[in-house]
Image (cartoon, rainbow, N blue to C red):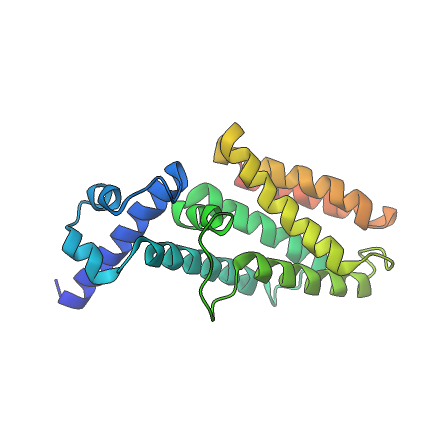
C-alpha cells in the first residue's frame, strides 16, 4: 500500500476512534491513551497526525461542519421552497447524527469546552446564518408570516435543534433524534406558517421523520 494512502487511512482511523470515545464519554473524560487503544495504533502514529487532543477535536468539528455544508449544498437547485429546504436540512443533519459518530461527536464538542480556532466558523453560527437566509426567503415566498423577527427565529431554531440532542444524550438513544426534530417542526410550523400552507409542511416533517427512523 502506498505510504500516503496508509497515512490517510491511519488518520481516518484515529479520527473515527476519537469521535466514538468523545461521543460516548465526553472530551474531558477521554485521554490520548484511550484513543490510541481504541484505534489500535501506536502513540507515534497518533502524534504524527495530531500534536494534541485539542487538534483531534478541531478536526472532528471541522468534518462535522463540512458534512453539514454538503447537506446544504446538495439541497440547492432542487426546486424546493426555502422553508422546505430548511426543514430538509435539519433532518439531513439529524440523519448524520444517527448514522455517523463523527458528526455526532462534532455536535457534542461544539456544545462543550472546545473552541473553534480562527479562521474556522463555529458550526452553530453557520446553521444560524443558513436559517436566517432561508427564513428571509420564506417570508418573500409567503410561506412564513411577514411580521416575524427572522434573526430571533433563526437563533431559536438552532437552539431548539441543538437542545434536542443535548437533552436527548442523557435521556434517550440517538435514534430518537429524528422524532424530536419532527416534534420541533410541528410546533414551529404552527407558529410561523399561515394556516393555508401548514398542512404541506406538517406532512413533510412527518414524512422525513419516517424516512430516517431506524427500522
Residue 7, by quadrant, is bottom left
Q: Is residue 103 left or right of residue 149?
A: left
Q: Is residue 150 left or right of residue 51?
A: right
11 is higher (above) or lower (below) than 167? below
Image quadrant where one finds the N terminus: bottom left
- Which residue is at 61% across, 37% downward? 180
Q: Return the x and y of residue 80 as percentages of the image width and height.
A: 67, 60
Residue 86, by quadrant, is bottom right
Residue that protrudes farthest toward the bottom in the picture: 119
152 is higher (above) or lower (below) than 112? below
Q: Return the x and y of residue 83 as percentages of the image width and height.
A: 71, 56
Q: Nearer the viewer, residue 213 or 19?
A: 19
Q: Nearer the viewer, residue 162 or 208?
A: 162
Q: Is residue 161 left or right of residue 61?
A: right
* Whether residue 172 is visible: no
- Which residue is at 58% across, 46% downward? 162
Q: Nearer the viewer, residue 125 or 101?
A: 125
Q: Return the x and y of residue 206 as percentages of the image width and height.
A: 66, 39
Amino acid at each position: 500500500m502506498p505510504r500516503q494512502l496508509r497515512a490517510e487511512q491511519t488518520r481516518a482511523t484515529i479520527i473515527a476512534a476519537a469521535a466514538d470515545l468523545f461521543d460516548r464519554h465526553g472530551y474531558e473524560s477521554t485521554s490520548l491513551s484511550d484513543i490510541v487503544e481504541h484505534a489500535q495504533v501506536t502513540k507515534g502514529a497518533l502524534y504524527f497526525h495530531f500534536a494534541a487532543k485539542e487538534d483531534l477535536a478541531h478536526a472532528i468539528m471541522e468534518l462535522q461542519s463540512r458534512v453539514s455544508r454538503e447537506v446544504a449544498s446538495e439541497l440547492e437547485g432542487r426546486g424546493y421552497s426555502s422553508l422546505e429546504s430548511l426543514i430538509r436540512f435539519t433532518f439531513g443533519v439529524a440523519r448524520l447524527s444517527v448514522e455517523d459518530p463523527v458528526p455526532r461527536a462534532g455536535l457534542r464538542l461544539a456544545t462543550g469546552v472546545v473552541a473553534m480556532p480562527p479562521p474556522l466558523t463555529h458550526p452553530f453560527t453557520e446553521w444560524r446564518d443558513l436559517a436566517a437566509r432561508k427564513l428571509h426567503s420564506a417570508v418573500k415566498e409567503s410561506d412564513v408570516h411577514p411580521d416575524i423577527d427572522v434573526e430571533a427565529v433563526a437563533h431559536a431554531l438552532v437552539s431548539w435543534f441543538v437542545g434536542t440532542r443535548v437533552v436527548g444524550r442523557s435521556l434517550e438513544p440517538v435514534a430518537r433524534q429524528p422524532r424530536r426534530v419532527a416534534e420541533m417542526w410541528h410546533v414551529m410550523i404552527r407558529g410561523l406558517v399561515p394556516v393555508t400552507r401548514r398542512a404541506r409542511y406538517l406532512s413533510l416533517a412527518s414524512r422525513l421523520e419516517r424516512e430516517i427512523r431506524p427500522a
